[in-house]
Image: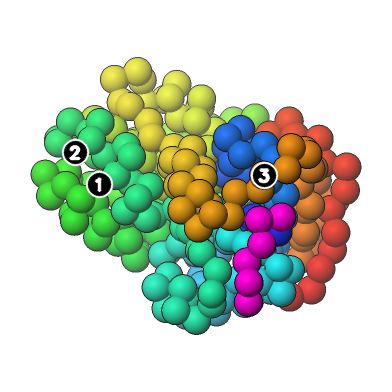
Amino acid sequence: MILEKQAPIAIFDSGVGGLSVLIEIRKILPYEKIIYLTDKKRHPFGTRSKNEIEKITDEIINFLISKNAKLIVIACNTASTVKLNDLRAKYNVPIIGMIEPEVISQYINEFTGKLAGLIGTKATVRSKAYNNVINKLNSKVNLYSKSCSELVPLIESGEIEDNNFMEELKNCLSPLLKVKITELIIGCTHFSFIIKKIKDLLGSNIKLFDPSRYVAQFVMEKLSEKKLLNNSKQIYEPEYLVTAKKEEFITSAQKMTLLILNDAKLITI
Ligand code: DGL
């Protein structure tokens, strides 16, 4: 298969979370066509088994290749924990996840070398994918990981303004305050939309790192290296594809991101 400059970048997640990556990509690559796929039918991914996550990721990538994608971004930390090298060997398209050495190396040097925190889904924490990459990049950084999977469905449905959500968030973050972390990695793309709330609860001494913008940077570098940057100067609206609950996706995406989504297309994978 020959990859073309005019072909779209395809981005996917289980829900609205990956839109944080889409927004960062559009900031630095405004002329790229983008397909955003959300697999709400199988949402959430983070409480599933390793095998299920592998199968889902493979199926989505296969589908996006059939849509002619020139590069695929796994805008989901949970799905990024699978063996990406196996998928890269199977498919002839660049695949970029959230937990790449090229992504983490952009921000790890700002860590103090004391204790860093990570919040992610149950599956992301279980996989130790962040630990593995971080240990190779900087063995002085210790990571304390906390699963906050219970926040994901609440963010997905847009229910983040009530007391129940703040209680859940406090419960999730309190162990991180106890162990005195100095930095926090936002290891689930859904959590990008509650960064202000996390900051308010943790205080200004803990520095937050959201991988989304570093992933966007790596996407730009990869397209440039592969000579796949789109050189036309036309701006396209992203195409949104959903596997279920189309209206819920449009409503919570607009609420979380302020993006204007005119429509989304219901698809079957
Ligand atoms: N947004 C995802 C992540 O970054 C997935 C959340 C989920 O489906 O559990 O892990």
x, y percent for residue 147: 39, 52
For label 2, the SS is strand
Say if the magenta span includes residue 166: no
Location of the C terminus (image quadrant): bottom right
Question: Which residue matches tag 1?
Answer: 144
Residue at 88%, 42% in the rendered image: 262
Q: Earlier in the sequence, mark 1 or mark 2?
A: 2
Q: Is residue 122 visible?
A: no
Residue at 37%, 31% in the rendered image: 208
The CA distance from mark 1 to mark 2 is 7 Å
Q: Earlier in the sequence, mark 3 or mark 1?
A: 1
The CA distance from mark 3 to mark 1 is 43 Å
Apparent side of residue 47 relative to residue 115 in the rendered image (left or right): right
Question: Which residue matches tag 2?
Answer: 115
The crowd level at tag 3 (other Cα within 10 Å; few <14, some 14-19, many 20+) is: few
Residue 115: name its quadrant: top left
Question: Which residue matches tag 3?
Answer: 231
Q: Which residues are magenta?
A: 1-6
Mark 2 CB in 8 Å range of ligand 1? no
The amino acid type, in three-letter code, at marker 1 is Tyr
Apparent side of residue 221 relative to residue 100 in the rendered image (left or right): right
Mark 1 CB in 8 Å range of ligand 1? no
For label 3, the SS is loop
Q: Is residue 129 visible?
A: yes
Is the Cβ of the residue at disc 1 closer than 8 Å to that at disc 2? yes
Residue at 80%, 43% in the rendered image: 237
For label 1, the SS is strand
